Image (cartoon, helix red, strand yellow):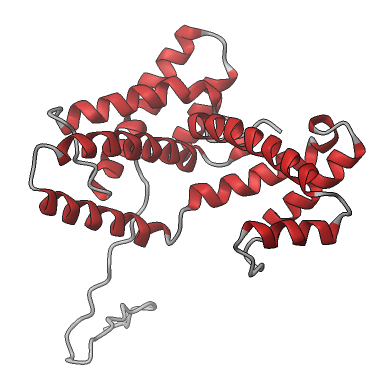
Amino acid sequence: MELEDNPVVVELTKSGQPRKRKPKTSHTYFTEDTQNAIVEYVASQDQKFRDRVYRERIEYGFFKLTQNIIHTFKFYYTDGESVEDVQQEVIAFLLEKLKLYKPAKGKAYSYFGTIAKRYLILKNKKNYKKLQNKGDILEIEEDKTIREEIINDHYGQDYSVSEFMTLYTKYVDKNLHKLFPKEIDAKTADAVVELFRKCESLDIFNKKALYIYIREMIDVDTPQITKIIKKLKVIYVDLYNKYYEDSYINM
């Protein structure tokens, strides 16, 4: 009898039993073709072509993506709606945002997954408030805590805020002199934004200390710093609203 050239090696556990391998997971429903189809959809102005591409190559990816997000993160506060109805609502929202996707911003799977999660988080928060007046508060709070722990375990941090702050800082850097035409205003804004860049390494938490820190960087008075911070805050709110809706910022 000839021996096989490549015999199968079976790994054993400490007890001598064959080790069971965990099946590899993959986003088989959101394939490279799905990615390419979305790029083609965005690039085309032919609505008939878009409708066909969506129906044949994108719709199933959106269906499975939203289904998995709803059940993975237990977005079950539906205020009387079925989970299926909520899912169709999210899919319709993704379709509305489909034309805004830009390949340079990253893979479509992550882009639309982020949009779907944000939409569901907002919807669940609204429905949660309604349920507080209807159900057992302790039971609702316990369920809410469990869901939030699942989300936190999955991401480890509030990824969306962290990502936005990076984009916000880049936006102000790139448009500094357009946003602040006066040289003194631009220098002050740059000093304030520098704090955003160093926020993780700074051991400063109160307003007075922050103002002193800025004055050490640039010789300006408190009213000047306050004026610039107010304008930066307006820019922040405006950009965050756009980022929340579209998941990107036009630089």
Q: Is residue 55 left or right of residue 22?
A: right
Image height of 81 relative to 47, above or below: below
Q: Is residue 217 left or right of residue 88?
A: right
Q: Is residue 217 left or right of residue 94?
A: right
In the image, residue 193 lies at what x, y percent?
73, 49
Quadrant in which residue 176 is drawn: top right
In the image, residue 225 lies at what x, y percent?
76, 46
Whether residue 57 can be seen here: no
Image height of 100 relative to 243, above or below: above
Figure label count: 0
Between residue 208 and residue 63, name the one nearer to us: 208
| View extreme (right): residue | 183
Between residue 95 and residue 163, name the one nearer to us: 163
Name the residue: 33% across, 60% down. 24
Quadrant in which residue 202 is drawn: bottom right
Name the residue: 13% across, 37% down. 133
Quadrant where the N terminus sits is bottom left
